Amino acid sequence: MGAPIQARTQEHGQAGAASRAPAPDLARGFMLLAIAFAHAPLFVTAVGHGSEVANKVVEFFHLLFVNNHARPMFAFLFGYSLVQLLNSRTRRGADWVTARKLLRRRGWWLVAIGFVHVALLVPIDILAPYGLTAVLVAGMLRRQDSTILWTAAISLVPATALVGASMWFPLAQGRSTFTAGSVAAGTKGLGELFVARLTGWPFGLLIGVVLVVPAVLLGIWAARRRLLEEPERHRRFLVRFTVIATAVSVAGSVPTGLIRAGLWTDPSGAASWPAVLAQPLTGYFGGIAMAGVVALLAPLAVRRRGRLTTAVQALGRRSMSMYLFQSVVFVAAFSPFGLGLQDDLGLAGATGVAAATWLVSLAIADLMRRTGHRGPAEVLLRRLAYRDPRPVTGSG
């Protein structure tokens, strides 16, 4: 009796996977690599340790394609998923009030999971800010497009100012824009770390919400048009946006990169401020453009259906679980309570650890796909937030 039930369950899972648009999951899978690149350097005490040339090259790469790109990409995909969730519930007969309550309940549980993530593992968390943002913007899902776009544009001002200020101070003092050991590494005991994380969590949560709201709203706007689910239908728009946004993003990151590389020495305050503001502002659109690149390549990837495509899609379907897995690996690798590599690796070394962690998570996600297991964090969130155990399309 057990074997037929298991076979039917796997059959249902495969059918669900086949009917699910691949681009959002592929984007989430590659997004985890960008998040790993962004977070791993925050676990080392000296980003300049090791080869100076290698660190400079990697830092320039980070400034062009990682810093302030990973967060907007994730936020954009999160906003996109809110519309997918809403559509999924309404297709099943739920009215607007019921669907909105579900989205907000799910958001509050994300805040709770993010709090536990910070308390037990690391002070770097993205789950709680996205959860609180979902609670705050759920009502926007029925607003007009113009309202959503204007709100996104207005919210981009404080978000850019906050990131720009955080970059300007270290640049003005000739230090790296990576604050490193002050964020996630150090020699504090477990008790001190626990207290420091809890006291700083509310402030970090509010700052995180300010930073992600613009891209979440843009994700909502894009999901209404099914840009990632129907890339061939929107190919002309996606190509234009991706090319222009990527070019603008790279151009906006070059001035800060030149300062960090020492090729632009002693810039005046009047010049450095526009430079540090341009990097996060254009980074928002560069991060979203990354999702556009994946959407454009998704039809070709699906037609060829290679092992890498299948594995990345499996990773995207388990993005929350694999994001938490990254934190476990980074704590084990860098902290004094693990291998203690925080004092031995610089920026280049930390980026290498990030890439290796992503490859391992890719293999784990593909193994889970082949054995018919969903991500444990995704299963937990469903059980906490949903009143029925059935899978919901687009929830990741």
Image: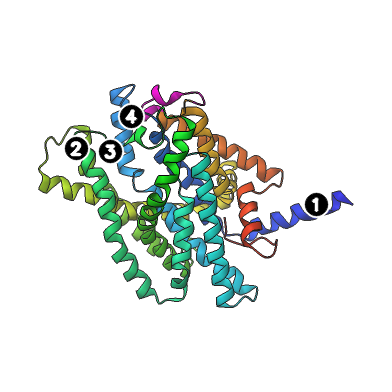
Distance between the alpha carbons at the discs numbered 2 and 4:
17 Å
Specify few, some or many for label 3: CA neighbours under 10 Å numbering under 14, 14-19, or 20 or more: some
In the rendered structure, which disc, 4 or 1, sits on the residue that comes first in sequence? Answer: 1
Residue 177 is labelled as 3
Residue 27 place in picture, x, y as percent: 49, 51
**Circle 4 residue:** 47
**Circle 1 residue:** 7
Residue 103 place in picture, x, y as percent: 54, 66
Residue under the point 39% across and 46% down: 200
Specify few, some or many for label 4: CA neighbours under 10 Å numbering under 14, 14-19, or 20 or more: many
Tag 3 secondary structure: loop
Distance between the alpha carbons at the discs numbered 3 and 2:
11 Å
Specify the amino acid type for callout 3. Answer: Thr
**Circle 2 residue:** 259
Judge left or right: residue 156 versus residue 236. left
Residue under the point 28% across and 47% down: 250
Closer to the observer: label 3 or label 2?
Answer: 3
Q: Nearer the viewer, residue 249 or 299?
A: 249
- Residues shaded magenta: 337-349
Specify the amino acid type for callout 4. Answer: Val
Judge left or right: residue 191 versus residue 258. right
